[in-house]
Image: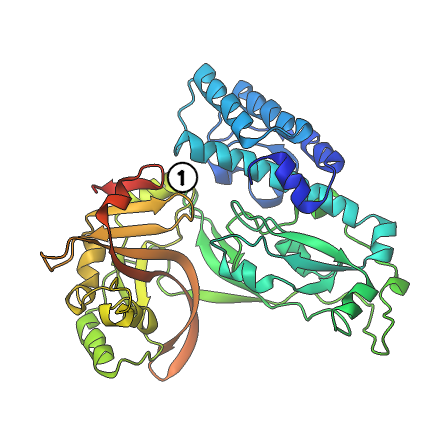
Amino acid sequence: MSGSRGVASGVGLPPREAIEFLRGKTNVTTQHWTDIWRDAHTRSFMVAGAATDALVGDFRRSVADALEQGRTLTDFRKDFDAIVAQHGWVHNGTAAWRSRIIYETNLSTALAAGRYAQQTEPETLAAFPFWQYVHSGALHPRLQHQAWNGLVLRADDGFWHTHYPPNGWRCGCRVRVLSARGVARMGRSGPDQAPVIETRRWVNPRTGEVHYVPLGIDPGFDYNPGLTWREPPRIPTDAVTTPRPARWPPAPPAPPQRVSVEPLVPAGTPAIAAPDFEAWANALLETRRSDGSVRVLGALSDAAMTWLQDREIAPASSALAITSAQFLHILRDAKAKVAKGLSIADALRLPEIVARPRAVLRERETGAVLLIFDPLDRAEARTGKLVVEFAMDLRVRDGHERRRVVMNGVKSGGLVDAARFRNRGEYELIEGSV
């Protein structure tokens, strides 16, 4: 998203209700982004770490101008630089990253609330009693958001209480309305069954408070800004009939079921590499078959966790693990056609790499965390990397049983040109050197 006009045109919404939503907020000073939690944002305007009324007020005016006047991110960044200089504000992250987060989060939330207000007008609900989740089409999608793409539910389904987008930082998903005839034209006799809402345990890094956050949603985003601002939708019962013979009950559905998915390594548990890692890896190398098992490799360093916490993107646990499928995927012969896989020797020392990477980077565009290391083969001119993904939702084998876990995992790895990591416009250095 490059500006509020782009955001507004993406949802087809004049920003009148969005402006009203933003104007109704009260300025609040904070020390940390979790000081205002979930639906409290509906009535409060805050910028994490902006601890004076004057500073919050200046940001509020700039965000309001961006929304009301259609000012772009480039315009907002000029204001951001001037406000920071005037107040001497020391903020987390780079100016480019922080200004984008402030701009996009406030505009997308306001537009979502405005869109919800329009979609729940009585005459709109009478004509369009169904909603469809539409994925943003991002180049680097959240897999769960992509899985919800095309989901059709009644407008009053409890799923929308927590899953009405945006569902995370920089989420560009949206909801579109559908009539009964529109649903029928899609070849459906009615709406889909609401997904079971599965949650993961997340610990507030500032307070230690435990929250259970729906999978696929960033902590703090599991609420509907429009719902907390407006009344819940009330759909006329005669609006849900379909021109097809098949009909579905118009009665409001039961609240969505929540199932807690256990973390592989709970927060606060020492993340020690599995002692049998080498034997486990060698067994996989013999069979070359994934068996659904998983092994803990170690943990991100305290310095890396502090860096991530300061930027409000830290996972609940520092532990890193790898599945059998991921382990086999990163090997050199598995990627022989492009010659970018790791050697067996490097794959067997993954716990050592996790414990002592040469550098830890964060890719600005995708947010992925990379562990950089030197290959054992001294003749290899390229640099090794491991790509880490936080809060992966997986089914793994534990003995003879399968269980569902959430883990921070090594998603992939390989060998790349070392020069690419020196591009500070593309990567942020968390620790170490490149």
Quadrant for the N terminus in the image: top right
Where 193 falls versus 41 (above or below)? below
Task: Assign a secondary structure to mark 1.
Answer: loop
Going 50% across and 56% down the picture, which residue do you hit? 141
Residue 75 picture location, percent across and down: 55, 25
Give the residue at mark 1: 311
- 198 is higher (above) or lower (below) than 171: below
Q: Quadrant of the C terminus?
A: top left
Left or right of 275: which side holds 109? right
Q: How many marks?
A: 1
Along the horizontal axis of the image, is 423 left or right of 102? left
Query: Residue 255 placed where, x, y %?
Result: 69, 64
Residue at horizontal 17 percent and vertical 63 percent from the top: 346
Q: Residue furthest front?
A: 337
Q: Position of residue 257 (x, y in %)?
A: 62, 67
Instruction: Give me the residue at 61% from left, 28% from top.
Output: 71
Q: Specify the farthest residue to the top.
A: 86
Disc 1 crowd rating (10 Å Cα; few below 14, some 14-19, many 20+) is some
Q: Is 70 left or right of 74, judged from the image as shown? A: right
Residue 64 visible in the picture = yes
The image quarter containing residue 343 is bottom left
What colouring method underlies this structural image? Answer: rainbow
Where on the picture, by quarter, is residue 225? Answer: top right
**Horizontal side, residue 81 vs residue 147: left or right:** left
Image location of residue 230, percent across then percent down: 76, 44
Give the camera-side residue of 113 and 182.
182
Q: Residue furthest left?
A: 378
Residue 48 visible in rendering? no
Where 297 sits versus 222, above or below? below
Q: Tell me which amino acid carries mark 1.
A: Arg
Front residue of 291/7: it is 7
